[in-house]
Image (cartoon, rainbow, N blue to C red):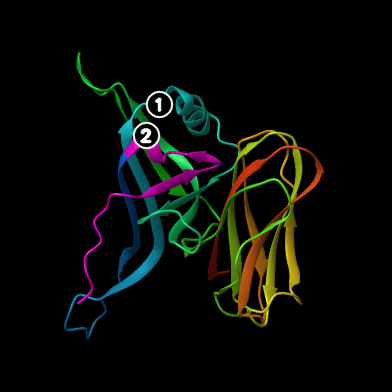
Amino acid sequence: MAAPTVLTNATIWLGGYDLTASTNEVTFNAARQEKPVSRFGDTIEATYPGAQTVNAEVKGFWDSTLDGPLFTQLTAPSVGWPLNICADGSAEWSLAYGIQAYSFKYSVFEAQWGQSLPYSLTSRAGSGTSLARGRVAFNKTITTDSYGDKYQFGALSATQKMLGFVHVFSNTGLALLCRIWSDADAVAGGETDRVQWTPGLTVPHREVMSVAGPVTDTYWRFTAHPTAGAGSAKIVAVLAIVDA
């Protein structure tokens, strides 16, 4: 029997912001709507799985540096932000869940005099997005070309795609190019460049990259490259295969 995991080291990334240090509770729910389909002749109440629903809630202590972006994403969302949650640390190849999230509830000031000021944020998946279960493929502060290790996620069928949830937390002056590569084996060299993204210089920055199937390669990696300028950048990427 596997030993239980004690939740002491969860990691929460949202749109290029690290919520981990201000958070002490996290909930990530995925479910299917229950659709009654009982018909004459059935001897039991029949139910069919309907649309998938996904929501995430984080709770912790109010942080003035996060209040502005969390409030803005709730009141004036332009696009869903990548949300990733790791249950046990954020080292490369740690398990990570992800959605492209919209914020639906941001609560503060639920406290009395003398109490630590709490906050909570509820997010749900937007239209056209998918629930993802993948791996932290890249977690580095870079100054030069940097490469995540290859991981054998598997091939993509014609009805699947590879998603890359990317968070650029900081950048002190680098023009950047981010890539998702695939390969037939774990040996360095011979990779195929599947998709590219050029982040803006303004940070934080975020993107959900996508590679459509079919792809017969089974190994995947994320890379980040300074193309101009000087400085450093902190980048995290989570890769996951989902149904298209």
- Establish if 194 lies above or below 76: below
Question: Whole-percent x and y of residue 130?
Answer: 51, 61
- Establish if 84 lies above or below 33: above
Range of magenta residues: 1-23
- Mark 1 secondary-structure assignment: loop
Residue at the image position 53 percent from the left and 68 percent from the top:
242
Q: Amino acid at mark 2?
A: Ser
Circle number at residue 22: 2
Residue 78 image-quadrant placement: top right
- Name the residue beneath numbered marker 1: 63
Frontmost residue, 171 versus 101: 171
Residue at the image position 73 percent from the left and 54 percent from the top:
145
Residue 182 image-quadrant placement: bottom right
- Mark 2 secondary-structure assignment: helix
Circle number at residue 196: none
Question: Whole-percent x and y of residue 24?
Answer: 29, 40
- 99 horizontally vs 47: left or right: right
Residue farthest left in this picture: 43
Residue at the image position 73 percent from the left and 67 percent from the top:
194
Give the spatial CA distance, label 2 vs label 1: 7 Å
